[in-house]
Image (spheres, helix red, strand yellow):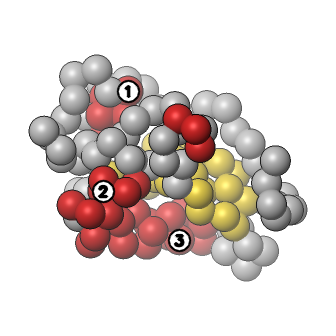
Amino acid sequence: MAGEPQADCLFCKIAAGEVPATVVRETEQIVAFRDINPQAPTHVLVIPKAHYRDAATLAAAQPQLVADVLREAAEVAAEEKIDATGYRIVFNTGAGAGQTVFHAHAHLLGGRGLEWPPG
């Protein structure tokens, strides 16, 4: 069921504290942690604790929670001191877009030049 923790979901386990991660920010609704395979000097994943398969599902079910993810991403950017130089927030939706963990999450990337379009 959408929103409920999934026993086989890596990010649900991280949100529950069952799998270790380098958490940089946490609220009642959100967890932000460093990506284990960073693509930029700052690469933090910002996830809702509630399980939704992807960004589209999350947005349809809980638009306020999407806003919370974006707000917390901005807070992490400020804490990481990349807010003044710029950063990117990316939601990959679906395997064809590169989503590998099917729990909605935003990638916060910064700390280097980020050319557009990405590769």
Calculate the distance from the C-alpha at mark 2 to the C-alpha at mark 3. 19 Å
Where's residue 108, x and y in %?
Answer: 60, 57
For marks 1 and 3, the one nearer the N-term is 1
Where's residue 3, x and y in %?
Answer: 18, 46
Name the residue: 76% across, 48% down.
Answer: 40
Position of 96 relative to 45 (above/below): above
Q: Nearer the viewer, mark 2 or mark 3?
A: 2
Q: Residues within 10 Å of mark 3 (few under 14, many from 20)?
A: some
Residue matched to label 1 = 10
**Mark drawn on residue 58:** 2
Calculate the distance from the C-alpha at mark 1 to the C-alpha at mark 2. 17 Å
Calculate the distance from the C-alpha at mark 1 to the C-alpha at mark 3. 24 Å
Outermost front residue: 96
Residue 35 is drawn in which quadrant? top right
Position of 72 relative to 99 (above/below): below
Q: What amino acid is found at the position of numbered circle 2 in the picture?
A: Leu
Q: What amino acid is found at the position of numbered circle 3 in the picture?
A: Ala
Give left or right: position of 111 versus 51: right
Name the residue: 19% across, 35% down.
Answer: 5
**Mark drawn on residue 94:** none
For marks 1 and 2, the one nearer the N-term is 1
**Mark drawn on residue 74:** 3
Position of 46 relative to 83 (above/below): above
